[in-house]
Amino acid sequence: MKQMRNAARTAVLLFVAVTFVSLTATAQGSGKAVLKVMSYNVNEGTDFLEVLSATNLDQFLKAVEVTLNNVDATNPPLRMQAVAKEIAQTQPDLVGLQEVTSWSVGGQVRYDMLEELLGALHQLGEDYVPVVVVDEFQLGGLLPDFVTSVQCLNHDVILARAASQLELSNIRKDHFNVILQLPTAVGPVDITRGWGSVDVSLHGASFRFIVSHLENYIAAAPATLLIQEAQAAELALGPAGTSLPAIVAVDTNADALGNDPTIATYQLITSFGFGDAWGAVHPDLAGPTWGFMPDAADPRPIRQRIDCIFFNNGIRALTAQLAGQRVQEKVNGLWPSDHAGVRAGLQVGSD
């Protein structure tokens, strides 16, 4: 862990030096740029089903222990090494990450998935640095000993590749106004979600890159679909409602394949004029991105396409690929995540 922390610090220092030069230079070029981007939900290690299902304090304490055991079983450091390999394979200029989670037990950090991922990338010779880190929901509880606390903090993150020498400005982040509140055995919990954005110039072409994670649809609670749609509208009209071309790396939790009512959220997003990189390049291929890790409630979930790279204002999708969805990409029997990543090659600017 100490070696990974040192590697991450080295990457930060390198990026600061590179970005300083980029930001003080005058943009040169044709006003057209071809860039590689990626969206990846790296999986926090649990869906918190046991905690949310507990109906009394005793059940809640036992559920916290089960949740921690489930996270341990997913081996976040090993999975972040696998995710790093997926990123390093195509060296995207920008990466939008969801569910980048830190876990603390007894006041000590057990897993810091962002630090573990940055360290693994550095070991592969790829230096990426977080441009935006959005604090999302935070959950916590005690283990059955009534003493040891377990805390998790969920993040969305934008990473930039140092070697790409992007010009970055107007870094912003915010939470959605409409969020889900869930009842638990120890009181209501707000599931805070939001977005982060950065304006980018590359070879004279300017655009905005956005990361986000929309609320999950719960069939037993139909109002969650309305919350998801409200967040999608906030995203489209807020950070993505810019005169700049926009690229949105997002876990929509909305199935583009139409397996449940969330297709309405996907259609809402596209109704705002956004193209979908996978759909544009592979109109006849399903391209499922979720369902690659057994779920406690359903060991064989229906696979859905809920992870997307959206774009607008003249951007053109040139390529689209999935990442981390092949059996040979498992590590010690584990998928890198329960999601597949999405890669896209995009052209910004005129021909």
Image (cartoon, rainbow, N blue to C red):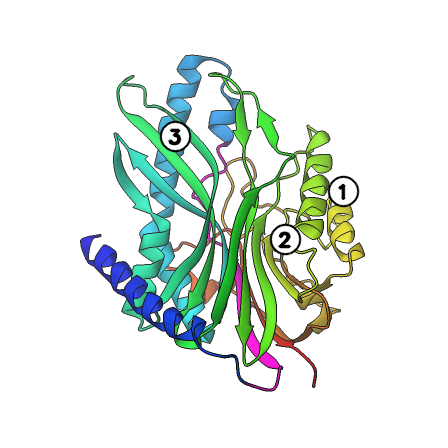
Residue 63 percent location from the top left of the image: 42, 25
Q: Which residues are magenta?
A: 29-48
Residue 103 percent location from the top left of the image: 34, 39
Is residue 38 covered in magenta?
A: yes
In the displayed structure, 189 sits above or below 228; it is: above
In the displayed structure, 180 sits above or below 93; it is: above
Check disc 3 and give the amino acid type: Val
Residue 24 percent location from the top left of the image: 43, 73
Is residue 142 covered in magenta?
A: no
Mark 1 and mark 2: Cα distance apart in space: 25 Å
Check disc 1 and give the amino acid type: Pro
Residue under the point 63% across and 46% down: 253
The quarter of the displayed image where residue 21 is located:
bottom left
| Residue annotated with mark 2 | 239
| Residue annotated with mark 3 | 66
> 258 or 155, which lies in front?
155
